[in-house]
Structures are given as structure tokens and as C-alpha cells.
Image (cartoon, helix red, strand yellow):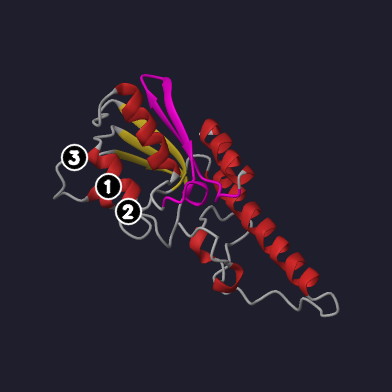
Amino acid sequence: MRIALDQAQNAWLVGEVPVGAVIMREGQVIATGYNRPITTHDPTAHAEMVALRHAAQLLENYRLPDCELYVTLEPCAMCAMALMHARFKRVVFGATDPKTGAAGSVIDLFAQDQLNHHTELQGGLMADACGQILRDFFAERRAQQKAERLLANPGADAGPEPLDHDAIPAGEATEVQVSSLPQSSYSPDTPQT
């Protein structure tokens, strides 16, 4: 998970939502990935998908039954299904995502008996650190947007921060909601995963 957190930091450095992923097989790192939807103009370029594509190419197989994925944020439905189609042995995630999580927060696709493959699932590994990087990223993003509003209109007060009834909880909370920020804090270039 520490490598996945490093990948999340890479995403932050290029202006992406900081989510990172690592694929391992038999104790060896096979592939890594971080969020890239903005920089690649690809809505499917989530950290898990980037790592999954690299691993499949390196191993020359779309089926990866002896691989495990470590990701800093609970997978969405797209990523969960891709991992199950690839027959992953296990998925481990850090922070939960109560707005779009497909590993138990909104829906648990991994627990669907009707599906022909069942991937082992573990959540909450290093959840505090995984959640904190996302909270810090969005706090920085909001501060930048406030500074930009002040620069655009130097004589006006930027005003109070918009009320955020769905704000990410502080303190002991480990849940991180990438989509929980107020809509007014998003720009068209801000990814919503």
C-alpha cells in the first residue's frame, strides 16, 4: 500500500485526483498506476485500470488469476468489474468511498453470487493515510480556487467558504468521498471519481 500511496502522490503532482494502485504476483510488483483521466483525456484511466492494462501487457494475458491489487481508494463499479473479468485473486483497498464505492460502500459487486468469478476483498488497509492524501488534495484545490477568485476580483472579498453539508469528516474518519465536495468547488476540469 505504501507503493500505491507513492503512485497517488504522482497523480497529485500532475493535477489528478491522488489515487494509486499496485499489482503484485507472488510477492513481486508487476505493475503500478495512478489516476490519469485528465492528462490522457480518458474517463477510464483510473489508477486500477492503468495498472491492470500494464500488467496484462507485461504478462501477455488478459486473465491474471494469481495477481493481487492494492489501491488507495475503494474501486468504482467500472474498476471492480474489470478486476473480476481479469480474474484477480484479491483486491485490497485503503479508504472507502461512500458515494461511488463498489466494494461494499454503495454496492458490493465482489459479493454478487451470480457472477462467475469471486475475488477476495479486503478494505481499510492504511485507511487513514489513504484518506488523508485525498483530503489534503481537495483542501489545496479549494484554497487555489479561492485565491483565483480573489485575483480575478481584487477589490472584492472572496466571501465565506460555501457551506459544505457533505464535507469529508475530520479526525478519526477514514471514509473519503471524492465526490463529496460541494459542486461549487468543481471546475469542468476537476475529475469526479
- The crowding category of the residue bearing disc 1, from other C-alpha atoms within 10 Å (few below 14, some 14 to 19, many at least 20), is some
Left or right of 122, for residue 141: right
Residue identified by numbered label 1: 81
Specify the segment rendered in magenta: 15-42
For the point 43% across and 63% down, the residue is 99
Residue, far front:
41
For the point 60% across and 73% down, the residue is 164
Mark 3 or 2: the one toward you: 2
Q: Which mark is residue 77?
A: 2
Mark earlier in primary sequence (3, 2): 2
What SS does tag 1 mark?
helix
Asked whether residue 147 appears in the rendered view, the answer is yes
Residue 11, image x and y in percent? 56, 43
Dots 3 and 2: beta carbons under 8 Å? no
For the point 61% across and 68% down, the residue is 185
Task: Identify residue type, mark 3.
Answer: His
Task: Identify residue type, mark 2.
Answer: Ala
What SS does tag 2 mark?
helix
> Which is more toward the observer, 145 or 90?
145
Residue 138, image x and y in percent? 62, 58
Residue identified by numbered label 3: 117
Mark 1 or 3: the one toward you: 1
* Residue 30 sits in quarter: top left
- The crowding category of the residue bearing disc 2, from other C-alpha atoms within 10 Å (few below 14, some 14 to 19, many at least 20), is some
Task: Identify residue type, mark 1.
Answer: Met
Is the residue 151 above or below the residue 89 in the image?
below
User: Marks 1 and 3, Cα distance to the nearest angstrom?
Assistant: 10 Å
Dots 2 and 1: beta carbons under 8 Å? yes
Mark earlier in primary sequence (1, 3): 1
- The crowding category of the residue bearing disc 3, from other C-alpha atoms within 10 Å (few below 14, some 14 to 19, many at least 20), is some
For the point 52% across and 56% down, the residue is 176
